[in-house]
Image: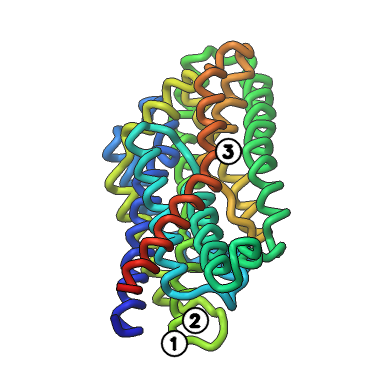
Amino acid sequence: MSTLALAILLIAVALTFDYINGFHDAANSVATVVATRVLTPFQAVLWAAFFNFVSAFTFGTGVASTVGKGFVDISLVTQYVIMAGLIGAITWDLITWWVGLPTSSSHALIGGYAGAAMANAAFRFGFRHALRGLVVGQWPKTLVFMVAAPFIGFVLAYGLMIAVYWLFRKSTPSRMDSHFRRLQLISAGAYSFAHGTNDAQKTMGIITGVLVTAGYQREFHVPVWVVLSAHAAIAAGTLSGGWRIVRTMGSRLTRLKPRGGFCAEAAAATSILFATFLKQPVSTTHVIAGSIAGVGSIQRFKAVRWGLAQNIVWAWVLTIPTSAIIAVLAYVIIRAILAL
């Protein structure tokens, strides 16, 4: 296969991942606003897709640079490494979407990319040197934010709920929710905007890596057409929806009212935008789940179904290593096919 044909194929696969990310994470974007019956599912995904795309024009491409060259040794990245990494991420995303678990597409991509780079290093330098495929780079910050981002969402949502109950202490619950049904349109839009700024940039990083490894760019710089295509793909994916995960996030984890939905979305949007400002790829799934748990905890600790939350956490823990293992297997298969 020619370099150009392979580059086009990889860009198509990367945009496919972005599309899958959109419908996998669509549930996170719309779960709260659908669960509180502020919008119908169709209205909600249109609202979310619009803000996913609009976010293309803000916050630059810092997260894209972090993903593209902050986790692996860029000198060991080839087009086949990128292909195997995408296969690992897409496969894990589809598995967790099928079983209805809201896992992180972001960490699946990072895990797949890292696993494929380690496999290439093992083939070139020997199995003992597989870790040469990784660089310290952004790993410490990213691993910290895996925990910090959902915790920030939890704390902010809890604090917002306390503020809401204090400010509306003389209002009836029905009157309170009549106000927050309108406000939740703003918070849902803000969350989808934040989701777009962080998640679409991860695919931009991968596509730019393809352009560099294929020799079409000398330096790691994200072109405008890559920015627009990545946001268009994630917006299109959001329009496709992810209703299996909506049920988990919007109703099974805890029961939400409009006031709770507003607080969860506002807290999650703030946490994600903070991470994007710091150029850190975070899991929008982790953050919204933490925020929803924070809202549920304000009622009483048992209002959150912690057994389900535990299953979600285990899925998060498994995401990076499992997607990495799948990517290693994919790289081995690709090498075997090329050797034929």
Tell me the SS state at disc 2.
helix
Residue 30 occupies which quadrant of the picture?
top left
> Residue under circle 1?
216
Up/down of 309 relative to 239, above or below: above
Indicate whether 306 appears above or below 340.
Answer: above
The correct choice, above or below, for 66 with respect to 272 in the image is below
Marks 2,3: beta carbons within 8 A = no
Q: Residue sitting at 45 percent across and 80 percent down?
A: 211
Q: Residues within 10 Å of mark 3 (few under 14, many from 20)?
A: some
Measured from the top left, where is residue 321 in percent x and y?
55, 46
Residue 36 or residue 292, whichever sits in front? 292
How many numbered discs? 3
> Mark 1 or 3 closer to N-term?
1
Q: In this orientation, which residue lies closer to the viewer: 41 or 134? A: 134
- Quadrant containing the C terminus in the rendered view: bottom left
**Image quadrant in which you'd find residue 133:** bottom right
**Left or right of 170 in this view: 196:** left
Report the amino acid beneath label 3.
Val
Residue 151: horizontal and vertical position, in percent? 67, 35
Left or right: 142 with respect to 264? right
> Do the residues under discs 1 and 3 have CB atoms within 8 angstroms?
no
**Residue, disc 2:** 212
Residue closer to the observer: 38 or 42: 42
Please rate how many residues cluster around mark 2, counting C-alpha atoms within 10 Å: few if below 14, some from 14 to 19, many from 20: some
Q: Residue at x 30, y 35 (%)?
A: 41
> Between marks 2 and 3, how big is the CA–CA gap?
31 Å
Q: Judging from the image, what secondary structure is the residue with disc 3 in?
A: helix
Residue 235's mark? none
Q: Amino acid at mark 2?
A: Val
